[in-house]
Amino acid sequence: MTYAADRIEEETAYLAFHFHWGVDDILDLEHADRRGFVARAAALVERAAQT
């Protein structure tokens, strides 16, 4: 099973923007770990928007 390139780019940009991580570091993450960090970042953004 492959993961769509546009989805990987979206996740990479999101994590790079919010956590200031390098592209190589993000791409080195396992898929599940990367998705987990995306979810955590989204939760932080949502919480900040509520204040």
Image (cartoon, rainbow, N blue to C red):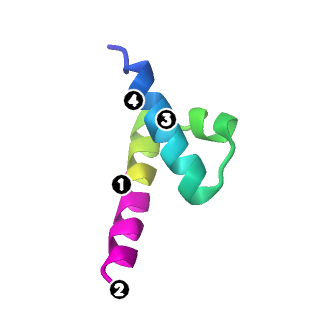
Which residue is under mark 4?
7
Q: Give percent across and percent down for residue 51.
A: 35, 86
Question: Could you say where residue 40 lies in the image, as x and y percent from the top left?
Answer: 40, 60
- Marks 3 and 4, how far apart at CA: 14 Å
Circle nearer the viewer, 4 or 2: 2
Q: Nearer the observer, disc 1 or disc 4?
A: 4
Give the SS element for disc 1. Answer: helix
State the residue position of label 1: 39
Distance between the alpha carbons at the discs numbered 2 and 3? 32 Å
* Residue linked to disc 3: 30
Question: What's the residue type where badge 2 is placed?
Answer: Thr
Which residue occupies 45% across, 36% down?
Answer: 10
Disc tally is: 4
- Going by the picture, which residue comes out furthest to the top? 1
The image quadrant of residue 6 is top left
Above or below 5: residue 30:
below
